[in-house]
Image (tube, rainbow, N blue to C red):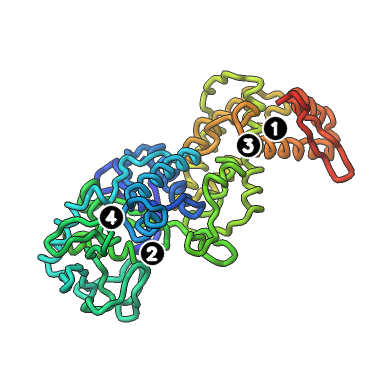
Amino acid sequence: MVRVYITDTLTKEKVQLETIEPGIVKMYVCGPTVYSYIHIGNARPMVVFDAFRRFLEFVGYKVVMVQNFTDIDDKIINEANEWGVDWKTVADTFISEYYHDAQLLGVRAANYHPRTTDFVDDIVEAVQKIIENGYAYAAPNGDVYFSVRKLENYGKLSGKNPDDLRAGARIEVNDLKKDPLDFVLWKSAKPGEPKWESPWCVGRPGWHIECSVMSQKLLGDMFDIHGGGEDLIFPHHEDEIAQSEALTGKPPAKYWMHNGMIIVRGDKMSKSLGNTFMVREAVRKYGKDGVKLFLLSKHYRSPMEFSDEILEDNARAAARVHAALNRFRDKYPYPLVPKEDEEMRESISKFIEALTDDFNTPEALAVLFDTSRELNKAMDIGDDERALKMYHLIKRVFGPVLGIFDSESSKRSESSSNIDMLVKSLIEMRNDYRKAKQYDMADKIRNILANSGIRLLDTPEGTKYEIVEGEK
């Protein structure tokens, strides 16, 4: 089994992945709070950790992956009140919509998708044990708070000093706390809110405790990798560590991986800022592979700038690869599996080397794009044997590992927006041939498009196209 290196947020170092159980990776990735549709920012950890899981499986690991749904939260309750329905209707609706969007993106389901409300009894039991272990206390109104300063190493994940900390997101400062840094494990229900029985009051779980309990129940006291967006490092993941160590005496995860944020005009993409771009809209406009290329085009730990122009560039790149694949499939509808040779082994080695080095998807994509160019070159000179090898590398190795190019982009199966990207890519290719005075190849592209019902028009403003009426 190859050596895989990742950057551990806890140690701030690149480390070799050494799993607790040989050959098995147990991974927990924080999922969405289900009160709205998911946007591109939500999709980044979905795509990144799905691809990372695929890669681990490719190099021989068995992966057990858990991704939760936070199905009870103030935002869900507020949304339900606006709809005039109960909280469960909102949660069920957007869990269903999440699966729809995940399917649009080609993101596989995790092995487990637990909901917070299915684990309330376990959460009550865990909170009681944390109290008994001396790390939490019940306030007079029945709220239960974690005593942050009783944990000596609180702040080790985020690098924050408790003496310098102020209450973070979703942490209320109030007179019921013994210390402003203490965070809620169990909160008393307000009138009209969903509620469950507990030894302290009728109420519901705090936000952070759910992940500690669900990961422990499904993966054990300690598992291999905890993943999520970097905005969760503090307070959510910091508080998860505190709870788990108070509960079991162990940190929840051996390694921590965090993806960078998507930035829109200098701000993090978030629903609260009103600068979101919904996944389903992005896929409709730019195609699944265009969106996924965008999300994998930067190193997962780096922030990403979002713009229509950047997504359009990635959609065109995806169209060029699809054009090369379809060009081969037009000649060989049922391609054989080639015998692996030194050139293929070298390409696969470069691809794996990039991904074993802290999951460097930009370097891996560079190998894929090089292979696509070589596929076109082989087709240009009629080297069908080499073309078959390049096609096989993209369709059977590189694409499946990253979760891209797993369907043919053709006039029969893609939306009009993807056809537009594909045709524009072919026009660019034709223009390149014309500049190189390879007019026979340029004419072949014109003829291929004409046979598909697409007429090219060379105008002073550049080459345009039209779909001939009655054709598709």
For the residues labelled 2 and 1, the Cα–Cα distance comes to 43 Å
In front here: 91 or 229?
A: 91
**Reading the chain from its start, which is encountered first: label 4 or label 2?**
2
Q: Which residue is mark 3?
A: 321
Q: Give the alpha-carbon distance from disc 1 to disc 4, as whole Å.
A: 51 Å
Q: Earlier in the sequence, mark 3 or mark 4?
A: 4
- Asked whether residue 241 appears in the rendered view, the answer is no
What amino acid type should be assigned to the residue bearing mark 4?
Cys
Kindly report the distance in space between the C-alpha atoms of the residues bearing marks 4 and 2: 23 Å
Residue 210 rendering spot, x and y as whole percentages: 26, 56
The vertical placement of 391 against 198, above or below, is above
The local crowd at label 4, few if under 14, some if 14 to 19, many if 20 or more residues have their Cα within 10 Å, is many
The image quadrant that residue 150 belongs to is bottom left
Of 170 and 326, the residue lying toward us = 170
What residue is disc 1 on? Answer: 377
Circle on res. 12 = 2
Q: CA distance from mark 1 to mark 3?
A: 13 Å
Among the two numbered marks 1 and 4 on one chain, the one whose residue lies closer to the N terminus: 4
Q: Secondary structure at mark 3?
A: helix
